[in-house]
Amino acid sequence: MQRRSGSKHTKVDMANLNVNIGKLQLKNPVMTASGTFGYGLEFSDFFDISKLGGIIVKGTTIHHREGNFYPRMAETPSGMLNAVGLQNKGVDYFISDIYPQIINIDTNMIVNVSGSTIEDYVACAEKINDLEKIPAIELNISCPNVKQGGMAFGTNCRSAEDVVTAVRKVYHKTLIVKLSPNVTDITEIARSVEASGADSVSLINTLLGMAIDVEKRKPVLSTTTGGLSGPCVKPVALRMVWQTAKAVKIPVVGLGGISNWKDAIEFILAGATAIQIGTYNFIDPLVSIKIIDGINEYLDRQGIGSVNELVGGLIK
């Protein structure tokens, strides 16, 4: 790697942004979060999506799901509430109609897997295991917007262990488990899924919140409560990533309120090997590529040769 001198720090021509999540290799630490980036194709008109470290496609279940009744989204100060409820056409539709369209995208295409029962999770993961061009799944045991399953598995150590253990038996590639912030101690859940075979944990999923229409004197969302995301959750997410990175040995993927490269660097310093961009994709469809450039410029300015040198800098 060529270096130039003449500033306070040794200047790097081009930093190494490669990171690893278990056996999964990412060209940079920036991924897009499930439910905020569709199947990636929707954003291909804005930039070359193959430049991303990974794309986590929308939540996929074994069967077709209609999701929750409308209204199911609401704007809040510095964020949003959603109660979409994992609307999707099921894993067989994904395999027959979506997979052929994304198979040649030159980045890690990762499927977010959810379910109402352990059997559902297993059946869905088993089908995706057979897809050659899908190198990893993100197991969603933390969704607060469904009446069955979802968050119920992620708020109890025993249930989290059970679902991860069952999926691990049939899924043989990189297994990332998405954790819920709606718990007393997220590190307990993280250690439980690590012991059950998770290769990585991602956090946080949305915080449980609500909004009320004072004129109608009714909840804004049809489900009363929903998942809160956006810049408003960042301090909570950052704290939980920092706690979890100290508690487990597997890589941590950080998300929650990231809207610029500085936010991303904060998460990396707190212990995240990689990060995900979520709600801000709705505000600026180019945000993820701007963050990749911002991270590189920061490393260059600081004279740091690899982003891996920053991971957990706050806790080393």
Image (spheres, grey):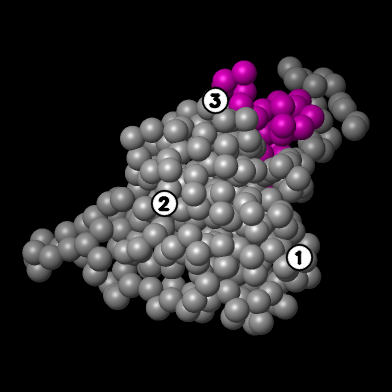
Whether residue 104 is visible: yes
Picture coordinates of residue 137, whole percent (x, y): 62, 57
Three-letter amino acid code at disc 3?
Lys
Checking the image for residue 133, the label placed there is 1
* Residue sitting nearer the eye, 108 or 77: 108
Q: Is residue 105 above or below residue 152?
A: below
**Left or right of 13 on screen, residue 241:** left
Picture coordinates of residue 18, whole percent (x, y): 77, 42
* Residue sitting nearer the eye, 196 or 215: 196
Residue marked by disc 2 = 153
**Left or right of 163 on screen, residue 41:** right
Whether residue 253 is visible: no
Q: CA distance from mark 1 to mark 2?
A: 28 Å
Earlier-in-chain disc, 1 versus 2: 1
Report the magenta residues as a range: 287-316
Q: Is residue 7 magenta?
A: no
Quadrant in the rendering for residue 102 = bottom right
> Which quadrant holds the C terminus?
top right
Earlier-in-chain disc, 3 versus 2: 2
Q: Is residue 137 above or below residue 198?
A: below
Contact? badges 1 and 2 (CB < 8 Å) = no
Three-letter amino acid code at disc 2?
Phe
